[in-house]
Amino acid sequence: MAGTEATVRFRIYDSNGGKALSSLHPAVWIDRREAGQVREARECREKIQSFLQPGFNRRPNVDLNSYFILALNHQPSISVIDPLFGFGGSKLFALVPLRSTGEDWVMSADKKRLYVSMPAINQVAVIDTAEWKPSAHIDAGVKPSRVALQHDGKYLWIGNDAESKGSGITVIDTVSLTVAAHLDTGAGHHEIAFTEELPKGLDVTYFVNDGSEANDLAVTMARLFTGNTDVIALRNGYHGGSPSSMGLTSHSTWKFPVPGAIGIHHTVSPDPYRSQFSGTPEEIASKSAEDIRELIRYSTPGKIAAFIAEPIQGVGGATYGARNYLSEAYKITRDHGGLCIADEVQTGFGRTGDHYWGFENFDVIPDFVTMAKGIGNGVPLGAVTTRMEIAQALTQRIHFNTFGGNPVCMAAGLAVIDVIDEDGLQENSRVVGKRLKDGFKELAKHQQLIGDVRGMGLMLGVELVRDRKTKEPAKKETLAVLEAAREMGVLIGKGGIDGNVLRIKPPMCITAEDADFTLDVLDRALTAVAK
Ligand SMILES: Cc1ncc(COP(=O)(O)O)c(C=O)c1O
């Protein structure tokens, strides 16, 4: 805040291999409360400033005197977690640069007393550890370096060691001396892991359970932030099955006849294979983007909240426009007050090979990135990442989700990110994906059913048609090909509104041998069906 003094007090504790907060991160504790004065840290003024903006704290029934902060010991940043939102899994609100160090408490040699200095109120708290219940873990290896007392003395926070009883942070109510809560810190670590891969500024993440919920939340935030209602989505897109994400979805096959699409409009797909426009793929992309402008002109008040698109449509059959499409669509959206949502539920985490995120293939930077599926490799986990100023739009009311950011899913998500990196799965997607795509193109030379081969990395589509000129969808033939392939040991998905696209999205650990086997099986299946 302008004009206030920079007096945030950091307590930073060496993690000493502190497994409780993860094997990487030392704990940092930050207090902020002094007679209504907003404090700032000199070292992290900018981010803390946005963190402490007025309005941010206007949550009913919430005491926001303190924040739990995690630090990466090998990164110049820390994540700020509101502990009071951590009961169902921490919600991470900010990443801030970190430079400070300090030490302000000590445990007596016999571990009977803990002395905590509280400079903010000029006192030293003396805490009798004998009164703690065993669940406080104080004797079981909690290192003196990882305990913090809220400066009003109300709560004591303990980072548990791996060798002690459990992980996470134990919060002790120092009045009742009972365990008040356990906080998970995995959310922050997970966020840091993948926000490192995202463009600068996209650094606030809200964890949810699945992709539908992530898209719902992104649209909600876009509406709150812009003050506009209308949302534009692509025809042939899939964004989920909850009432509002089903509204974003544009496939009659996936839409139940129930209301849900309030304020949602569907623009033409830029897919050059089946476009209503003629011209080069780039020309078709531009004409398709222009349809957004028309839609805004005719069907909205002239301002929109958001444009949402999968960089490559998954359920729609691996379709996408030429490279200029998304940048033109994003520009038109932003010219009309809207924010851009990239639904990376299928394209994220390296699947498209050349890039970690699908949108990077199209040289755009979205305002929201929604994620699920691959983020947890099977566990229920979703997320929406956005910019701080947009996320703050959510703070005007309580938004809560019991399981979002829960420790089990966070641990799985972190492991997935490690495996993607350590096993080089993005590179594998690029290399094996190219082998497959080249192979499908080769098959298309003699398999007349193949009308189009498209996609990037391990996100490929092979569209089957009865006639390459009329492009009549080969619906029955597609089913027969899938059955024949299944009998030969290869499971292939089906996509497109007519169900005539082979969706090739294998696990990212697929090998070159697997790819060759798939190509061989598909060749035989197509030959059998064509007879
Ligand atoms: C692109 C895309 N967005 C959103 C969703 C919805 O995700 P979930 O099924 O996890 O709700 C899906 C699911 O298939 C998807 O493919």
Image (spheres, rainbow, N blue to C red):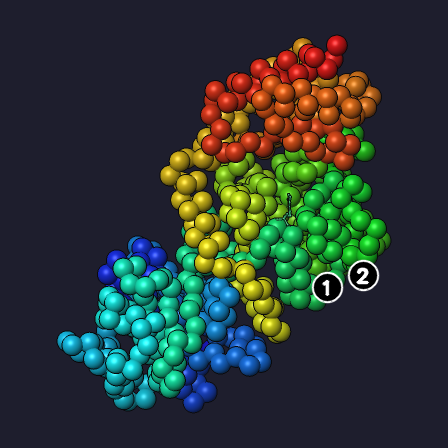
Q: Under tag 1, what secondary structure? A: loop
In the image: residue 359, left or right of residue 271? left
* Total residue callouts: 2
Question: Which residue extends farthest front?
Answer: 134
Q: Label 1: few (<14), some or many (≥20) within 10 Å? A: some
Q: Can the viewer see residue 389 in this picture?
A: yes
At horizontal 52% and vertical 48% (from top left) the residue drawn is 379
At horizontal 73% and vertical 21% (from top left) the residue drawn is 480
Q: What residue type is disc 1 on?
A: Asn
Q: Quadrant of residue 525?
A: top right
At horizontal 50% and vertical 34% (from top left) the residue drawn is 508
In the image: residue 329, left or right of residue 112? right
Considering only vertical position in the picture, is 76 above or below 445?
Answer: below
- Mark 2 vs ligand 1: CB below 8 Å: no
Q: What residue type is disc 2 on?
A: Pro
- Using the image, tell me which numbered label, if any, was put on residue 228: 1
Considering only vertical position in the picture, is 349 above or below 476?
Answer: below
Along the line of sight, which residue is nearer the eye, 43 or 90? 90
Q: Under tag 2, what secondary structure? A: loop
Along the line of sight, which residue is nearer the eye, 135 or 351? 135
- Using the image, tell me which numbered label, if any, was put on residue 301: 2
Residue 415 position in % (x across, y down)? 42, 47
Residue 316 position in % (x across, y down)? 70, 37
Quarter of the figure that contains the C terminus: top right
Question: Which residue extends farthest left?
Answer: 109
- N-terminal label among 1 and 2: 1
- Using the image, tell me which numbered label, if any, was put on residue 412: none
